[in-house]
Image (tube, rainbow, N blue to C red):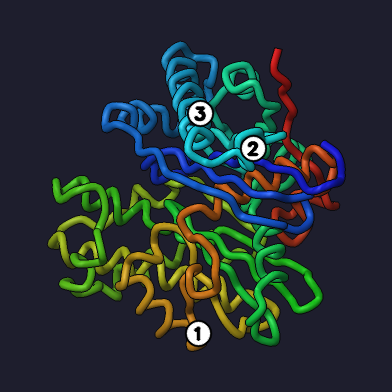
Amino acid sequence: MNTHPAVALGLMSGTSVDGVDAALLVTDGESVSAFGPRRTFPYAAATRARIRAAFGRDDREAPEVRAVAEEITHLHADAVAALLAEAGAEWASPELIGFHGQTILHAPERGVTVQIGDGALLARLTGVPVVADFRSADVAAGGQGAPLVPVFHRALVRGWAGRPEGWVAVLNLGGVANLTAIAPGGAMIACDTGPGNALIDDWVARHGAGDCDRDGRLALAGRADDAWIAQAMGARFFLTPPPKSLDRDAFAPIAPGAMSLQDGAATLAGFTVKAVAVAAEQLPERPSAWVVTGGGRHNPALMRGLAAALGVPVLKAEDVGWDGDALEAQAFAYLAARSARGLPQSFPGTTGVRQPLPGGAMHRPA
């Protein structure tokens, strides 16, 4: 890929396992010239179950894990074809695809991160060069392997016309929550803060009440157990300063026990909020504003809790002109462009790697 801006397509399947997010943009890997169409392609319930059954496994060559990897690769190819078919002529021929794959295990303390999905197969199926395996190089070099989107967050913040003075924080509330704090000069500090939506989603599903706390109705009807939250916050992870990252299910073993559905949802929402607030205290300077992306921004219990805990404006991505449902897919289109140019995607302040490091593996169509 040359240094001129080009059309790139990003694909993301997050730890919430709700489907494939696909998004187009024009970028040179440093700035974004234009945002294109995007769409989410939900997984069928059976697919979600097969992916969840692979969580926690590091044996990606096991037949059942390989079968899931092939299945999701074909579903990603279908998503590419569907998005391009409806995107319009100016977007119909991307030069590059960024393919994150599906994380099934993330254990940086063991030097392990596992994303399944076949980049070479996706390139053959789509006829477009594919950049995949974004995290392995960082982990091999001693980094956390996550979060990787801070450099894209910085590009977005630089393009935010109404950006306030001082530090700005971008908070992604996915299955795991992660933040990027960006200084006026562009320096970045990033980390996973702790649980995002994963514990709440699992709690609701375990009680047969759906797959998430839609619109925060359950949490808003319940009462948080502050003693449970305080005990959960005693975990070593929360005492560790950034950069740091964790697995989706790192806190699953401590999920609440004998609580009502509503009180459990309120307690887990409070846990997510408290974890963000503690991470904010570990930053070198208090951000003047927070911009929240990811599915958690749709949960009023989380958004109200964050506003109260952080004491500064807490905005949704859409409030500043970003697309909060497409942002991670857009990020991997952007990271693919950086990878093609050999530009770094992880930094000492974002993953703890010793020096800025490029990443990703290129696969070209046969």
Give the mark, 3 or 2, whose residue is nearer the N terminus.
Answer: 3
**Image depth: mark 3 or mark 2 in front:** 3
Label 3 sits on a secondary structure element that is: helix
Give the mark, 3 or 1, whose residue is nearer the N terminus.
Answer: 3
Q: Is residue 69 above or below residue 277?
A: above
Picture residue at 65% right of the left edge, 85% below the top:
164
- In the rendered structure, the answer to whether residue 113 lies left or right of residue 136 reads left
Query: Disc 1 designates what residue?
Result: 313
Quadrant position of the C terminus in the picture: top right
Q: Is residue 28 above or below residue 123?
A: below
Residue 121 percent across, percent down from the top left? 59, 17
Q: How many numbered discs?
A: 3
Label 2 sits on a secondary structure element that is: strand
Q: Is residue 104 visible?
A: no
Residue 97 percent across, percent down from the top left? 65, 34
Three-letter amino acid code at the position of disc 1: Pro
Query: Disc 2 designates what residue?
Result: 98
Q: Quadrant of residue 166?
A: bottom right
Disc 3 to disc 2, C-alpha distance: 15 Å
Disc 2 to disc 1, C-alpha distance: 32 Å
Give the mark, 2 or 1, whose residue is nearer the N terminus.
Answer: 2
**Image depth: mark 2 or mark 1 in front:** 2
Choose between 79 and 86: the one closer to the eye: 86
Query: Disc 3 designates what residue?
Result: 81
